[in-house]
Image (cartoon, helix red, strand yellow):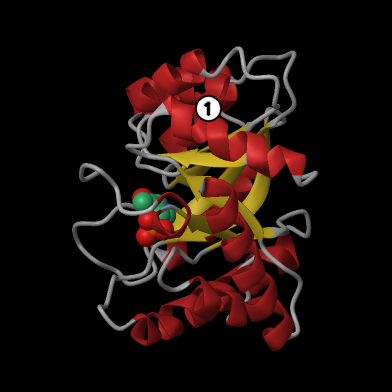
C-alpha cells in the first residue's frame, strides 16, 4: 500500500529531523518509471493527509505524458524536474513544471526565463552543483554558483530557491556525509547573498537521514515510496 510507505517515510523523516534538532524537510516523491495510476494513488493518499503532493520526474517527455494522464485528477500536484535538462526542452520545462532543480548553466537560465508564461508565478529554480567534481556528471562547479545565482536573481520570471546536489553514490551512504556538509556550507554562502534562497535539495531513499542531519530542507525519495523501479531510469 502506497499510503503505508508514505506514512513510513514521513515518520522516518520526522524522526531524523527531530534527532538532529531540525524541521522536517519537504518530501518530493520521485516517480520516474512509475505509471500514472501509481502516481494518482499516492497523490490521493498524500492529499488526504492535508499536504500538497509533489512529484519529481527526470525526463520532460515522460513527465508530460503522465501529466496528461493525470489531468482529470482532482488533486493539485506540484511537479519538479530533477533530471538533466537540454536547452531544446527548456520551453516545455518552463511551461509544465513548478520547479526545475537542475539549472547548471547560464544558457538554461535565459531560456527558462524567456519561456515561463506571464500568467504563472515565477518558475522555482535550484542550481544543481556537482559537489563531488565528477568529470562525467551534470551540475555546475561550486565556483560557478555565484554567477549563476546572480543571473537567476536578475530574472523576474524565475525565483532563485537554492541548491540541489547528488553526491557520488558510495555504496556506504555514510561516505556521502562529507559531500552533504560541503553542500550545506555552499548553501550558507548563497543565503548570505540571496536570503530568499530557502531550499537545499539533497537526500534520497538510502541516505535521507544523513542528509537531514547535515541540513537538507528537501529530500527526493523514489524507491522507499514506490518500491524498486520496474525498469532502470
Ligand atoms: C532517481 C532519483 C532520486 C530518487 O532515488 P531513490 O534512491 O529511488 O530514492 C532522487 N534524485 C534524483 C535526481 C534521481 O534521479
Residue at 44% across / 60% down in the picture? Answer: 224
Which quadrant does ligand 1 occupy? Answer: bottom left
Q: What is the residue that sits farthest to the front in this orientation?
A: 1
Left or right of residue 161: residue 28: left
Q: Is residue 99 visible?
A: no
The residue to which callout 1 is attached is 112
- Under tag 1, what secondary structure? helix
5 and 65: which one is in front?
5
- Tell me how many marks there are: 1
Residue at 72% across / 19% down in the picture? Answer: 120
Q: In this view, does 154 lie above or below 202?
A: above
The image shows residue 136 at horizontal and vertical percentages of 19, 57
The image shows residue 20 at horizontal and vertical percentages of 68, 86
Q: In this view, does 213 lie above or below 37?
A: below
Q: Which quadrant of the view contains residue 179? A: bottom left
For the C terminus, the image quarter is top left
99 and 5: which one is in front?
5
Within 10 Å of disc 1 (Cα), the crowding (few <14, some 14-19, many 20+) is many
The image shows residue 40 at horizontal and vertical percentages of 55, 30
Residue at 35% across / 86% down in the picture? Answer: 175
Residue at 48% across / 25% down in the picture? Answer: 93
Q: Can residue 24 be seen in this view?
A: yes
The image shows residue 129 at horizontal and vertical percentages of 43, 60
Q: Does the closest atom of ligand 1 sit within 8 Å of the Cβ of label 1? A: no
Amino acid at each position: 500500500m502506497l499510503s503505508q510507505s508514505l506514512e513510513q517515510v514521513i515518520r522516518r523523516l520526522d524522526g531524523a529531523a527531530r534527532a538532529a534538532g531540525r524541521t522536517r524537510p519537504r518530501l518530493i516523491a520521485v516517480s520516474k518509471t512509475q505509471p500514472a495510476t501509481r502516481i494518482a494513488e499516492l497523490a490521493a493518499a498524500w492529499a488526504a493527509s492535508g499536504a500538497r503532493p509533489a512529484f519529481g520526474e527526470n525526463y520532460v517527455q515522460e513527465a508530460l505524458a503522465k501529466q496528461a494522464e493525470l489531468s482529470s485528477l482532482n488533486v493539485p500536484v506540484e511537479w519538479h524536474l530533477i533530471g538533466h535538462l537540454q536547452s531544446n526542452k527548456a520551453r516545455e520545462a518552463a511551461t509544465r513544471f513548478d520547479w526545475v532543480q537542475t539549472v547548471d548553466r547560464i544558457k538554461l537560465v535565459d531560456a527558462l526565463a524567456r519561456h515561463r508564461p506571464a500568467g504563472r508565478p515565477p518558475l522555482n529554480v535550484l542550481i544543481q552543483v556537482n559537489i563531488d567534481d565528477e568529470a562525467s556528471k551534470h551540475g555546475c562547479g561550486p565556483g560557478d554558483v555565484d554567477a549563476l545565482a546572480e543571473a537567476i536573481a536578475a530574472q523576474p520570471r524565475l525565483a532563485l530557491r537554492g541548491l540541489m546536489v547528488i553526491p557520488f553514490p558510495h555504496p556506504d551512504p555514510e561516505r556521502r556525509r562529507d559531500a552533504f556538509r560541503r553542500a550545506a556550507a555552499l548553501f550558507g554562502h548563497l543565503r548570505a547573498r540571496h536570503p530568499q534562497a530557502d531550499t537545499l535539495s539533497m537526500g534520497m531513499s538510502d541516505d535521507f537521514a544523513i542528509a537531514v542531519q547535515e541540513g537538507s530542507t528537501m529530500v527526493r525519495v523514489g524507491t522507499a515510496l514506490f518500491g524498486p523501479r520496474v525498469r532502470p531510469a
